Amino acid sequence: MPAGPYVALLRAGFRQQSRSAYVNFGGLLTNVFFGVVRTIVFTALYQQRGSVSGLDLADTITYVWVVQALFAVIFTNWQWDFARRVRSGDLAVDLVRPADVFLATGAFDLGRNLSQLVFRSSLPLLGAALLLDLHLPTSVPGWTALGVAFVLAALLSFEFRFLQECTAFVTQDYRGIGRLIIFPAYFLAGFAIPVDFFPRWLQTVATATPMYGMLAGPVHVAQGLHVLSALALQVAWVLALGLLCRAVLTRSIRRVVYAGG
Amino acid sequence: MDDLLLYLRLARATLSGYAARPVLLITGMLGAAMAAGVEVVAIVLLLGRFGRLGGWDAHEVALLLGLAECGLAPALALAWRLETSTFAALVTSGEFDAVLTRPISPLLWVLASDVQAREIGRFTVGVGTVVWAGGAGRVHWSPAAVGIVLLSAASCAVVLMAVHILGAAVTFRTGQGTEFVNALIFGGVTLASNPMQIFDVGLRVLFVYVVPVALTVYVPALHLLGRTGPPLVPRALLPAAPLAAALLLGLSLLAWRGGVRHYQRTGG
């Protein structure tokens, strides 16, 4: 399978996202603002206790800034481009092309997310690392692991969105379904509060979903907590969701083609 | 006055569009309810682990959150068309020219064209949170207390709408959406959902005296909970909440008018 078209799409996605620098900067400011507010809130919470659920203040502040780093990657690409192509029939053009639809869409999406990671995610995180007391990796393998975790999160985010957007094959109201899924996913991934602060039973549930790989996993890698199992879970989910995406796409296309669409 | 009546007719027409797509409305309302609900669950779980935030317990903080959501919901419902990236598209595409031809103030036309009924979901969660948090926090629901809640929600909504309008006014001049507006609105609500004593002077001044989201949420809550506020945010500020909201709205309308004139001068 030639890599050429996929690399080209990756670069195209990267370029497209990087072009909207002004919007990215605004988004960056938003991230910084939320990061500052949540840092203040957690600092106030930790005034009475040194450690809660095994996390101290530095661990939790680290969590706050990893959330801000990954927020754009997980959520802002949720613009239903693929779903729109499905509804409008433009997808037929993609099917005629030699590149695999799933991989091609994924390559472009990954390009966009890599741009987000470089120009938006890394800056507040590095800034916070310099100005605040975080528990970030201090070795090259540690930082590499964190980078890998971020990229895996981006892939998982794509696959999760892709699956949701495939509902466009069967309904006009894919957006409505998306809105219903976003908030449970947001919560289970740990964007509202760290997964470590969930009640035990909810922690187990959250860790068993792919949402873990989107945020909680990378947070643990950053904090240096069970790094290898976090990465392994991420990889496993990327593969599992990837296969599921493939299967859903193939069946959906076959049904559409049979219907003459 | 005619303009307002016309706005109501147009808004009603927009809303009746939902009747044709009930599934869209229901999923939207559930989504908005979840957006607010997630925050409530988060604060309850968090304070379950930590005990107190700035000396306030879970119910007291949840009351702040409930009030803020009650203010955010109407603002998002009414001002959705001013959402920064969609409004930027309206301006840059020249579609705004068509708005200027209508026999109604352009702002009211724009607002009427997209009323988000789904925010009822968020409002419901907000009200539910206020009722639950107040009950558990032993708030005495006298008519005065109910009046304070209404004052808080209305003032907060007006402040947030004014921020939307200010953002739109800026968009007229820059031709681009600005995420900064979202930061002030959603960031402001997030900030105001926490007791102000945990924030330093700079943020207190910013969100009580400049973009007074916290003024409209925290100060009323002080009265409901029978608490005193930190330096710079005393209980006595309560009457300032609606006044500040009205002032900010006035300023935003002036800015909007300036923006429209700029748009017309530069050929649209």
Image (cartoon, rainbow, N blue to C red):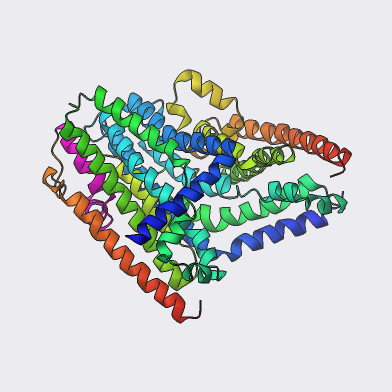
- Answer with the quarter of the image where residue B121 lies: top left
Instruction: Tell me the magenta residue range.
Output: B198-226
Q: Is residue B213 magenta?
A: yes
Q: Is residue B141 above or below residue A27?
A: above
* Residue B251 appears anywhere in the view: yes
The picture places residue B47, in percent across and down from the top left corner, at 33, 28
The residue shown at (42%, 48%) is B76
The picture places residue B102, in percent across and down from the top left corner, at 47, 67
B102 with respect to A95 (left or right): left
Q: Foreground: B206 or A180?
A: A180
Q: Is residue A193 above or below residue B97?
A: above
The residue shown at (57%, 56%) is A118
Q: Residue furthest top?
A: A201
The picture places residue B204, in percent across and down from the top left corner, at 23, 51
Q: Look at the magenta stretch and give its main secondary structure.
A: helix
- Answer with the quarter of the image where residue A162 lies: top right
Q: Foreground: B61 or A122?
A: B61
The residue shown at (35%, 29%) is B128
Q: Foreground: A124 or B102?
A: B102
The picture places residue A152, in percent across and down from the top left corner, at 64, 41
Q: Is residue B145 above or below residue A132?
A: above
- Answer with the quarter of the image where residue A8 lies: bottom right
Quadrant that contains the N terminus of chain B? bottom left
Total marks placed? 0
* Residue B198 appears anywhere in the view: no
